Amino acid sequence: MRRWLVLILMVAAVSSLFTLARLPTPLLFGGLAGALLYALVRPQAPLRLPDSWFQAGQAVVGVIVGASMDWHSLGALGPRWLVVVGVSCFSLVVSVLVGRLLIRRGASPATATFASVAGGAAGLTAMADDLGADARVVAVLQYLRLLVVLVTMPLVVTLVFGAREDGPALGVTGTDWRVDVPFVAAAVACGLLAGRLLRLPSAAILGPLLVAALLTLVPFFDGAAVPPVVEALGYLVIGVQVGLKFTAASLRAIGRMLPTALLTIVVTLVACAGLGWVLTVTTDASPLDAYLATTPGGIYAVLGIAAATDGDVAFVAAAQMLRLLIVLASAPLIAAYLRRAAS
């Protein structure tokens, strides 16, 4: 009992610091960092969360992603949808190819691939074990990419595009808990069942994701969201489960990968900016909207900047959501290919 209390205090302290610092997904990565700290300080007293808890956390993350699907925004793509799909697929291919550099630093092909994929950091971290990747490396390098994106994006928007954030801030609307609670319960229960019956890869996350996305089409659930407490618990469980797996040796191994990882992140950012230029040339999107639509991660920050600069928020949201769907849907297929290639 004492070990669990120490873990809870460490996770609570680090998560609170991450939240106050307004870091991305503070509870997921705060839980990871707090559990990592425990694993390093108390290696003689290891802990492990029950598998059912981790599966529940995966399901919650799946519902969070599914609930974020705005079908009305996707409709805003109009005739541009084919170009956006092509650009999204190409950005996925580029990030996967660039990630191969991590293999030279000791990462397995699956780990190198999913640690480098642009977009879907929380979903990929939750799916990493199912995909045959090292969740510790995936989590750290995906988080590093998010931080680089969030630091560089405001600078690019201001210095390159000369945009000023003088528009209205992006508001987040909530719904009644009487809508949100049954929405989450139905999405998790039906999603886990559907995932098993359909034999979906990474069923615990993809099943609830698909069901949640479909439920948003039901008028009663229009605008439904995951209650903050449930969202927090889902992210914390995923983060803690991954963090408890760390050892001093694994941390040193990840440290050796960081210079190469930073190089892959920079190349991915430049490539995605280039794809933004392609989007500008082939559609009627403005250069700023095209850049925001192809930015590799940080979707909520991206939408906030789009709103504050009077950009086309619907188009940017649709492009970002479409890429997120492509990433999470293709991840199991890529993992299967890597397994076949290895054998």
Image: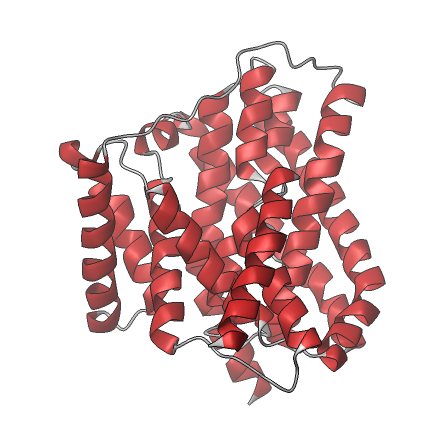
Closer-to-camera residue (70/14): 14
State the image coordinates of residue 17 (x, y, percent, origin top left): 64, 46
How many numbered marks are there?
0
Q: Quick check: can you spot residue 22? A: no
Tell me which corner region of the image, top left, top right, bottom left or bottom right, holds residue 216: top left
Compared with 198, 24 (above or below) is above
State the image coordinates of residue 322 (x, y, percent, origin top left): 44, 42
Tell me: 300 left or right of 174.
right
Closer-to-camera residue (114/86): 114
Compared with 273, 141 (above or below) is below
At horizontal 34% and vertical 64% (from top left) the residue drawn is: 56
Q: How is the image coloured?
A: secondary structure
State the image coordinates of residue 141 (x, y, percent, origin top left): 68, 60
At horizontal 72% and vertical 24% (from top left) the residue drawn is: 157
Q: Classify the position of the C terminus by image quarter.
A: bottom right
At horizontal 31% and vertical 39% (from top left) the residue drawn is: 225
Q: Residue furthest front?
A: 2
Q: Quick check: can you spot residue 118? A: yes
Tell me: 69 left or right of 312.
left
At horizontal 34% and vertical 60% (from top left) the residue drawn is: 59
Q: Residue furthest top?
A: 166
State the image coordinates of residue 7 (x, y, percent, origin top left): 55, 68
